[in-house]
Image (spheres, rainbow, N blue to C red):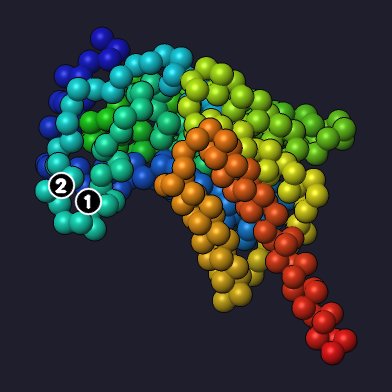
Amino acid sequence: MWFESAHVEATRDSFPEWMALWFALLSHLGSIWFVAPVVVLAYWFWDRHRFAPWLGIVTGGYAVMIGLKELFQIARPEVGPAIEPETLPTVVAFLYAPAVEFETMAFPSGHALAATIVWTMLALESDVGTGRQRLIGAAAMVVLVAFSRVAVGVHYPTDVAVGALVGVGYLATALWLRDRVAKTGRFTPTVALFASAAALSVLAMWGSGKPDATALLGGSLGAALAWRYARPAREPWSLGFRGFGRALFGLALLATVALVLLVVETTVVWFAVGLAGGLVVVGLPQFLSALSTAATRADATS
């Protein structure tokens, strides 16, 4: 009843075949390839002290997802994609295949969970429209992402419903922790949330043995260290040529670090890649600021 492949197949077949491409694109709005760049760029280009806690919240959310998938061990529906990726042009297949080809467990949906977190972040922290309008828009995006996962045939309706509910519950707990720590003043909310993400990552590692959880632990610790010893100014990078150049440099640096995994995939390497990623994301603004200051002083004394 709760996990019937026939229900997923009926949903997939109720739409024209070409719509599978649109559903695949929609599902990317809850994908790690969307969520991670959004939260990182928000940290770099908006108020850093406001968005730094969200780095910890998102990291912890992925740890929760990994742990729960391994706990329940529910396989994906026995339903193939409406369109086989190998029949598509290379560029289209490059975007389509990651949305329909998975080897991980199904329950709960990581896309629905992550979409709940990142779209709620944008609704709570942005200034576009009214708060109510932003929350309605965020809820609509979560529903679209959740439905798209069923429509492309990779999730049961139960997967996405529970994924979104887990996302809401986890997010409510994380925001409560953030506000509680801010009131006590003993620790900064950012440090508390990085510590929480690290603890959740350890639990996910213990329960799953997945290298992804090891990378999340490394990322949490790297980000916490950078925040402790290289905390940047609150002011963001400008939305100009210089700011975009710095962002491209940062993203290229992160991609270079991740390429190490194509050569070696041991647990230690996954941890090291996560650690380096956390250091780069959080510490890069302060590092570049220090370089700029040093260059200015050198010019002044020359």
Question: From where the camera sits, is residue 277 visible?
Answer: yes
Q: Is residue 285 left or right of residue 126?
A: right
Q: Relative to 68, is 261 above or below?
A: below
Question: From where the camera sits, is residue 160 visible?
Answer: no
Question: 45 or 161: nearer the eye?
Answer: 45
Question: In the image, residue 214 lies at what x, y percent?
Answer: 56, 32
Mark 2 surroundings: few (<14), some (14-19) or many (≥20) residues within 10 A: few
Q: Secondary structure at mark 2?
A: helix
Q: Is residue 78 left or right of residue 67?
A: left
Point 87% across, 32% down: residue: 186
**As shown in the figure, which amino acid type bears the numbered disc 1?**
Ala
Q: Relative to 55, is 203 above or below?
A: above
Q: Is residue 113 left or right of residue 101?
A: right
Pointer 1: what residue? 93
Point 53% across, 66% down: residue: 248
Say the numbered circle drawn on residue 86.
2
Question: 89 or 265: nearer the eye?
Answer: 265
Question: In the image, residue 177 lies at what x, y percent?
Answer: 72, 28
**As shown in the figure, which amino acid type bears the numbered disc 2?**
Glu
Mark 1 surroundings: few (<14), some (14-19) or many (≥20) residues within 10 A: some
Q: Is residue 134 left or right of residue 229?
A: left
Question: In the image, residue 297 lies at what x, y percent?
Answer: 84, 80
